[in-house]
Structures are given as structure tokens and as C-alpha cells.
Image (cartoon, rainbow, N blue to C red):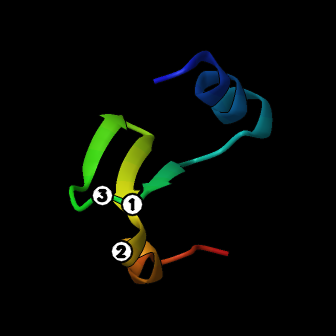
Amino acid sequence: MTRSMHVALEDLGLHALYVVYPGTERYRLHKKVEVLPLTELTKLRWNS
């Protein structure tokens, strides 16, 4: 987890942050940060 991720979560008041990459594994970096493959991007449920 990078410092910029911490800053983004705090400054923007984000409930979640997603890191999208071209791999195949989905995993958590932090309780509010999840890494997911590009292929799973369409499976996310966005809250308004």
C-alpha cells in the first residue's frame, strides 16, 4: 500500500479503492483497498 493510496482514501473520503491490473488473482492490500484483475472490473457493484 503506497502513501498516495493512504492520502487518496483520507483526502477524498473514499470508502474503497480498487487497483486494477492485467493479472488473474484478486486480493486485498488493506481493509479498504482491493487489487483485482481487469477481467473482473465489470463485476463490481458501484454504489451511488
Outermost residue, top side:
3
Q: Are marks 1 and 3 in contact (CB under 8 Å)?
A: yes
Query: In the image, residue 36 lies at what x, y percent?
Result: 36, 58
Residue located 50% across and 52% down the image:
18
Which residue is identified by label 3?
A: 23
Q: Amino acid at mark 3?
A: Gly
Residue located 42% across and 69% down the image:
38
Residue located 25% across and 47% down the image:
27
Which residue is identified by label 2?
A: 40
Q: Mark on residue 22?
A: 1
Q: Is residue 44 above or below residue 1?
A: below
Front tag of 2 and 1: 1
Q: Amino acid at mark 2?
A: Glu
Outermost residue, left side:
25
Q: Of residues 20 and 33, which is closer to you in this image?
A: 20
Q: Secondary structure at mark 2?
A: helix
Q: Secondary structure at mark 3?
A: loop
Q: Secondary structure at mark 1?
A: loop
Q: Is residue 40 left or right of residue 16?
A: left
